[in-house]
Image (spheres, rainbow, N blue to C red):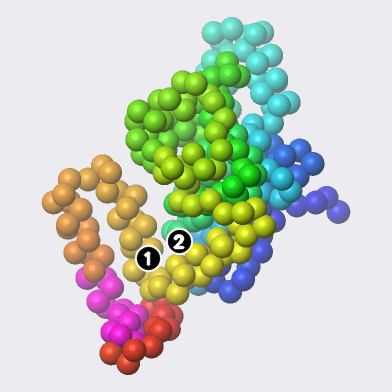
């Protein structure tokens, strides 16, 4: 029986998705993307799920796009010239969607960058809501050094996370940087010793899971739309989301827990 390209583990209301080709540094193939998108689709409608962690097996998060795939596309481009641009565009656009399916999850997502996250591999981490890295991890958007324009939403996510000027530097230079710098520029939330990373990220996921699920999912929706919204629009969104929360049993539980000086026990309805 072939080894699963993406592992799924469940610990109560937290799920972990693991890229699982450590011998290839979790290089991103279409087969792995299809496996990842299938896993995400299976989690998307699970109302009991409160957080999802994405990580890699072995010593890398992901070394980026599969070399054989890139070589094949370069051959198509060389042979087809301008005629190859549109079919290659269609191939890449569908490839992006497989891995960026993580953005479709309604609950918070946390990337646990256990090792190198390079090129498209870094972009998958950028597509998560939060990123945490092992201090030994190295990261980089090295597209320019391969002779290719950034893909996998790098030119959209990076400016929103680190600001346009820092994003421009990272993309123009294609340089590799360490976890300490990544934390300093806000690309990752925090860096941890490698042996502590997954435990720390699981504790953070558990903190998220302890909060009211309806409120947390609503917060994710609000954050996703905030950069393109006016203040007035965002206030309307917040008022609507709060209106929804006031109809739930969870708010009564939260207020009761506050009054009784105990931890709340939210059930998500």
- Residue 215 on image: x %, y %: 34, 68
Badge 2 is on which residue?
107
Q: Of the residues under marks 2 and 1, which one precedes in the sequence?
A: 2
Tell me the element at label 1.
Answer: helix
Please tell me how crowded label 1 is: few (under 14), some (14-19), or many (20+) other residues with Cα within 10 Å: some
Q: Is residue 41 visible?
A: no
Residue nearest the observer in this picture, 232 or 81:
232
Residue 100 magenta: no
- Residue 26 on image: x %, y %: 70, 41
Q: Residue at x 56, y 58 (%)?
A: 53
Tag 2–tag 1 contact (CB < 8 Å): yes
In the shown orientation, is residue 260 left or right of residue 113? left
Q: Residue at x 57, y 16 (%)?
A: 147
In the shown orientation, is residue 2 left or right of residue 245? right
- Residue 162 on image: x %, y %: 39, 38
Which residue sits furthest right? Answer: 1
Please tell me how crowded label 2 is: few (under 14), some (14-19), or many (20+) other residues with Cα within 10 Å: many
> Which quadrant of the structure image shows residue 79?
top right
Q: Quadrant of the C terminus?
A: bottom left
Residue nearest the observer in this picture, 121 or 261:
261
Q: Which residues are magenta?
A: 243-258
In the shown orientation, is residue 34 left or right of residue 179? right
For residue 12, the mark is none
- Residue 59 on image: x %, y %: 72, 45
Badge 1 is on which residue?
216
Residue nearest the observer in this picture, 80 or 190:
190
Tell me the element at label 2.
Answer: loop
> Which quadrant of the structure image shows residue 202?
bottom right
Q: Residue at x 20, y 53 (%)?
A: 234
Which residue sits furthest left? Answer: 232
């Amino acid at each position: 029986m072939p080894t699963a390209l993406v592992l799924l583990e469940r610990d109560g209301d937290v799920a972990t998705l693991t890229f699982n080709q450590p011998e290839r540094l979790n290089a991103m193939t279409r087969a792995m993307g299809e496996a990842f998108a299938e896993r995400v689709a299976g989690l998307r409608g699970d109302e009991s799920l409160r957080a999802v962690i994405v990580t890699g097996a072995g010593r890398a998060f992901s070394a980026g796009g599969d070399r054989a795939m890139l070589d094949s596309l370069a051959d198509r481009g060389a042979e087809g010239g301008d005629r190859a641009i549109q079919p290659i565009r269609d191939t890449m656009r569908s490839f992006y969607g497989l891995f960026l399916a993580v953005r479709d999850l309604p609950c918070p997502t946390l990337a646990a960058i256990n090792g190198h996250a390079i090129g498209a591999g870094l972009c998958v981490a950028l597509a998560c809501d939060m990123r945490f890295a092992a201090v030994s991890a190295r990261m980089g958007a090295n597209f320019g050094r391969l002779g290719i324009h950034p893909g996998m939403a790098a030119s959209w996510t990076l400016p929103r996370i680190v600001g346009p000027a820092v994003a421009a530097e990272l993309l123009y230079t294609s340089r590799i940087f360490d976890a300490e710098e990544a934390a300093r520029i806000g690309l990752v939330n925090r860096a941890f010793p490698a042996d502590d990373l997954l435990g720390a990220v699981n504790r953070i996921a558990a903190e998220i899971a302890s909060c009211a699920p309806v409120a947390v999912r609503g917060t994710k929706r609000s954050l996703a739309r905030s950069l393109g919204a006016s203040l007035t629009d965002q206030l309307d969104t917040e008022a609507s989301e709060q209106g929804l929360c006031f109809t739930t049993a969870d708010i009564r539980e939260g207020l009761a827990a506050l009054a009784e000086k105990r931890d709340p026990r939210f059930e998500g309805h």
